[in-house]
Every structure is written in structure tokens, then in C-alpha cells.
Amino acid sequence: MPALDNDRHERFAIEYAACLNGTQAYMRVYRSSSYDSARSSAADLLAKPSISLRVSELKKENTERAGITAQRVLSELAAIAFSDITDIVQTHPGITELRNIEDLPPNVRAAIAEVSDTLNETEANSNRRVQVKLHPKPAALAQLFKYLGLDSDINIAIATLAKYGIRLVQKPDGWVVEDSAN
């Protein structure tokens, strides 16, 4: 799709595709607009099929240019969701050591949010403290859960029924309750 005929609409689409905030995008293009007016007008513009289509196209171009793919995003989420601290540290009786970061595989390094190294020195001794913080697993798991459709009504119903020993199974002719003894 070529650029939109209306220059301001095209600029709005470009701004929105970059920041994903309609109010901010509108205020960058229509500088004299108030916040409330921008909020309302941005929603109106985004409801127009031509602008919505152009934004989708621009977002796709942006993700391709950045090398972002669904597979890459899912791989990063999975690295966080299924991270294991023992891949990063090793323990011996009374000692916990950080493994060499450079030796860790990329999927393990992806789960690390922060590494801090603190040295506390006193006249009597020195004490070094290394701290590793991982990205939050619950958030990554929740995103994967949603992406995989595990939060759908039918999956929730199946899980709820299973708690009571009732097995709901989809057959070619529809859903049936199977005897849990089978």
C-alpha cells in the first residue's frame, strides 16, 4: 500500500506504528491539539480502514527491518519462562558460584535480567557479593499461556472438570464426557 494521500494521516500512521500510543502520535502531528482532543481524534483515525491498514503495513515493515519474528519472540519468552537458576549458578557445600557468563548458551543468557557485583571492604576483611536477577517467569508464562490459547473458555472448562475427575474430550462428532476409568 502506498503512502496515504493525506500527509497528516500518513504522519500519524508513521508515528503510531513507532510508539503504539494514539494520543502521543496525534499530538506529534497535530501540535496544537489538547490531550483530550488528541485522545478522541486518534481513536477516530485508527477506526478508519485506510489508516488501520497503513499502520499494519508500517508495523510489519518495522518488525522486518528489526529482524523480529514470532519465532524469535516465542523463543525469548520460552527462555525466560523455563529458565532454571542451576544453569547459571553451581553450588557446592557452603559455596554458590556464578558460572562463566560467556560460556552460557544464548537461551540461558536471555533469561538473565541483571548481574551485579559488589565488593565490601573493611579493615578486617573483604567480602564480594555477586547477585543474579532473572526476568520474571510468571509474566513470560502468562504470555505464552495466552499465545497458546490455554486461557480459552474451553480449556478452562476442561481443566475445571478434570479437577472433579470428569474428562471432556473432543470427538469428530462433538464433545463427549469420557469415563475417567478409561
Image (cartoon, rainbow, N blue to C red):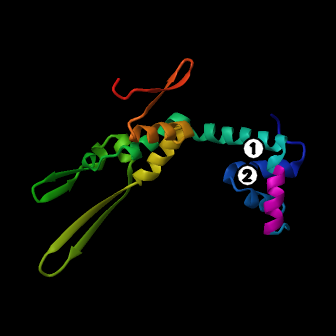
Label 2, on which residue? 16
Element under label 1? helix
Residue 58 lies in quadrant: top right
Residue 35 or residue 109, whichever sits in front = 35
Q: x, y (%) of residue 1?
A: 80, 34
Magenta stretch secondary structure, dominant: helix
The mark found on residue 181 in the picture is: none
- Left or right: residue 147 versus residue 29 is left
Q: Is residue 51 visible?
A: yes
Look at the numbered discs 2 and 1 and tell me whether their residues touch, using CB distance below 8 Å. yes
Residue at the extreme bottom: 123
Q: x, y (%) of residue 79?
A: 40, 42
- Crowd around label 1: few <14 · some 14–19 · many ≥20 (10 Å): many
Residue 154 or residue 147, whichever sits in front = 154
Count of marks placed on residues: 2
Q: Is residue 68 visible?
A: no
Quick check: is 147 in the magenta stretch?
Answer: no
Vertical order, 167 against 35 (above or below): above
Span shown in magenta: 35-45
- Left or right: residue 173 versus residue 97 is right
Q: x, y (%) of residue 158?
A: 47, 36
